[in-house]
Image (spheres, coloured by chain):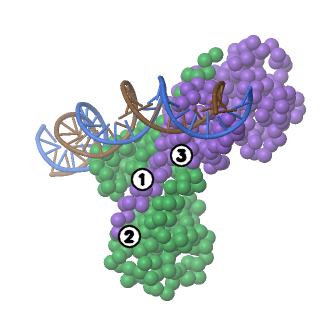
Chain colours: A green, B purple, C blue, D brown
Amino acid sequence: MSSTTPKRAVFAQFAQTAKTLGHPARIEIIELLAQGERSVEALAERADLSIATTSQHLQTLKRAGLVSARRDGKFILYSVAGDAVMTLLSGLRVVSEQHNAEMDRIVRGYFNQRDAMEPVSRTELLERARSGLVTVLDVRPADEYAAGHIPGANNIPLAELEQRIGELGRTREIIAYCRGPYCVYAFEAVAALRQAGYEARRLEDGLPQWRAAGLEIAQGDRP
Amino acid sequence: MSSTTPKRAVFAQFAQTAKTLGHPARIEIIELLAQGERSVEALAERADLSIATTSQHLQTLKRAGLVSARRDGKFILYSVAGDAVMTLLSGLRVVSEQHNAEMDRIVRGYFNQRDAMEPVSRTELLERARSGLVTVLDVRPADEYAAGHIPGANNIPLAELEQRIGELGRTREIIAYCRGPYCVYAFEAVAALRQAGYEARRLEDGLPQWRAAGLEIAQGDRP
DNA sequence: CATTCATTCAATAATTCTGTTGAATGTGAT
DNA sequence: ATCACATTCAACAGAATTATTGAATGAATG
């Protein structure tokens, strides 16, 4: 009764899936795809990778069934293969957070303002936004903002924040958000805003979680 | 505003955690540890690895914060670092199942009796066991059985099943269980029992899930 | 039908991972 | 102290992964 062959095969499959997530670039690609489908070129630019490298990572991800692809004219648009993939990524995040002392060191070491880390929950944001107490700031690139954003949110991509910081009023607290809990744009925006003397925190989640919670989404390039 | 350094660092951490799960032996080790703490030697034997190799995998797992260790006399006992790790593993399983066509091929190809795959849920097992309609069979090694099992379950380790198959009555359906949904002992037991003319299915989950659901656990080497 | 362009493939060198071997560490027992 | 033993460490060869380069597909456009 050789139990070893199929047992090993099953474990090998799990390991293969895990291995596929075992490269920073592939994690970043999935995080980007969580926003919506993207072409190879678009992904390469955003993740700062060469086209060929990006394509190869996408092949790897596709082989493991983590992303799917469809052709649209000249482009091949990739997207996340299903919610289970995001759940898996979230599991990775939780474990990395909980167990990896290194993680704390990195995150805290970079933004050494302790309370800049205190996130605002979705419900808190909703309450305070309704009461007009806060300014909601979407720091993602303009096209992602246009594709869907939190109603009422202003958009200043992180890259432009330094120049355009004057557009923001100083009276209300600013709550920045991005793609997800570990999309660092929000972290960096909060750091920059605080440095400039603003009161700022980040939203605990990002737009994908907002969408997943069934909350309203606005579209277009204006709040 | 060099956003790349800390962003990359965070992704690198996630990737590191994923990479740690990217080896079949380490997955198997975690699956074994899900049963309870084990010494290096015990793990090496069960996973059919050399002591040194096992130790190194354990170091890797510990470095990533997936397992923890404590000394007990001469032995060092390892255990899973927390529930989040099992959640992550479960996420891996779901994704591998859903997206990996390979997985189906392996599992179905090996046990080509289609309905042998139909699992019994925990609630169904409870109902039918209370009514005395089924025999519950724990096919894990005797020591794991002694450490904790479903109340009323008989224990015949898979290795002894062929010789001891006569101990089982033919009148009632047999429901076999093991460590978890992908612990293959249960699969193999069902296959063997059916081949011998028994009516048999497997429990959907294993003992860790039973325990996690807060259900009663019996101890000792008797039902 | 030829051209353009997004994507993929193939081949390479650099790096990283794995398993084995044998020695080293540290604990409990004699 | 010395011994036995569980575990870890160190060093090595073999295997796998990665980014880069340049060529090859394959669909759309004129």
Q: Position of residue B119 (x, y in %)?
A: 70, 32
- Which kind of residue does numbered mark 1 sit on? Glu
**Crowdedness of circle 3 by 10 Å Cα count: few (<14), some, many (20+)?**
some
Q: Which residue is mark 2?
A: A157
In the figure, B44 relative to A103: above or below?
above
In the figure, B222 relative to D10: above or below?
above
Tag in front: 3 or 2: 3
Per the model, the C-alpha gap separating discs 3 and 2 is 37 Å
Q: Position of residue A48 (x, y in %)?
A: 32, 55
> Is residue A164 toward the left or the right of residue B98 in the image?
left
Label 3: chain? Answer: B
Q: Which residue is mark 3?
A: B63
Residue that extends furthest to the bottom in the rendered view of this protein: A171
Q: Quadrant of residue A120?
A: bottom right
Q: Secondary structure at mark 3?
A: helix
Q: Quadrant of residue A125?
A: bottom right
Per the model, the C-alpha gap separating discs 2 and 1 is 18 Å
Labelled disc at residue A28: 1
Depth check: C29 or A185 in front?
C29
Which mark is first along the chain, 1 or 2?
Answer: 1
Q: Residue at x 83, y 31 (%)?
A: B220
